[in-house]
Amino acid sequence: MTRLLPATRRRRLGLAVVATLAATVWAATQDDASPEDANVPSRAATTRTPPRTASTPTALAQAWPDPPAIAERPSWRDALPQGVAAWGPAPPPPVAPPPARAAAASAPPQPPEFPYTLIGRIDDGQPWAMLSNRERSFGAKASDVIDDVWRVDAIDASGVTLTWLPGGITRILAFRTS
C-alpha cells in the first residue's frame, strides 16, 4: 500500500466531504413521493385542512374527569415503625461499661493460644514432638524453647506439656484421637 502525502490526503478528504454535502442537499430537495406511491396524489394536489387551533387551558380542565370524593378515597395505611425510625435521628451509641481495673489487676495474665499444631510423635530413644503451623514444621524435644515464649517440659503418650515462659503457666497439648 502506498502512503499518500498529507496534501493529497487532505484533498481527497475535502472532496469526500463536498460529495457528502452535495448528496445531502440533493436528497433534501427531492420530492417525497416514492415509486410505490405513484398512485397517491402529491401533497400539493390534495386539499388542505385548516390547522387545528390550540385548546385553551380551561377547555382542557373541563375535559379532565372529576376527582373522586374524599369519602371514596382509600386512607393511607399506617406507617411501619421501621420506616418511621429510618427518617428520625440516629439512636445514640450504646454506652460501654467502665472497665473493671481492680478485677483485671488481680487476675493473672492468660497465655496466648499455642501457635503450633501437634502432628505427631517420634520415639527414637528420646521422644520428639512434631509441631507444625502455616509457616514451618519442626521437631522439639524436652527442654527445647519454642519462639522464646514456650518451653517443652515433657513428651509422653498422651501429649506434650508446655510452659508459657512470660507467665510460668503450664499447658498440655494433647494428641488428637482418631
Image: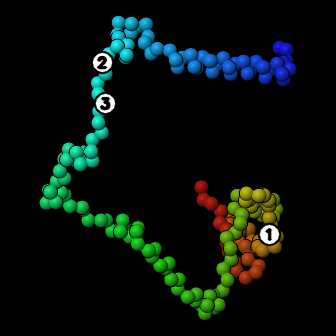
- Above or below, 115 against 10 in this view is below
Task: For mark 2, give the secondary structure.
Answer: loop
- Residue 39 picture quarter: top left
Residue receiving disc 3: 51
Depth check: give the residue in front, 76 or 147.
Answer: 76
| Front residue of this view, candidates 103 and 52 | 52
The residue under the point 70% across, 80% down is 169
Residue 136 lies left or right of residue 102; in this view the side is right
The reply, left or right, for residue 71 in relation to residue 174 is left
Specify few, some or many for label 3: CA neighbours under 10 Å numbering under 14, 14-19, or 20 or more.
Answer: few
Which residue is at 29% across, 33% downward? Answer: 52
Question: Where is residue 97 shown, x and y percent of the image?
Answer: 52, 86
Give the residue type at disc 1: Ile
**Residue sitting nearer the eye, 36 or 111:** 36
Callout 2 amino acid: Thr
**Residue 82, horizontal then vertical, whole percent:** 36, 66
From the top left corner, tell me how far across and down residue 61 is, in percent. Answer: 23, 48
Q: Identify the image quadrant of the C terminus.
A: bottom right
For residue 119, which quarter of the picture? Answer: bottom right
Element at label 3: loop
Where is mark 2, residue-wise?
A: 47
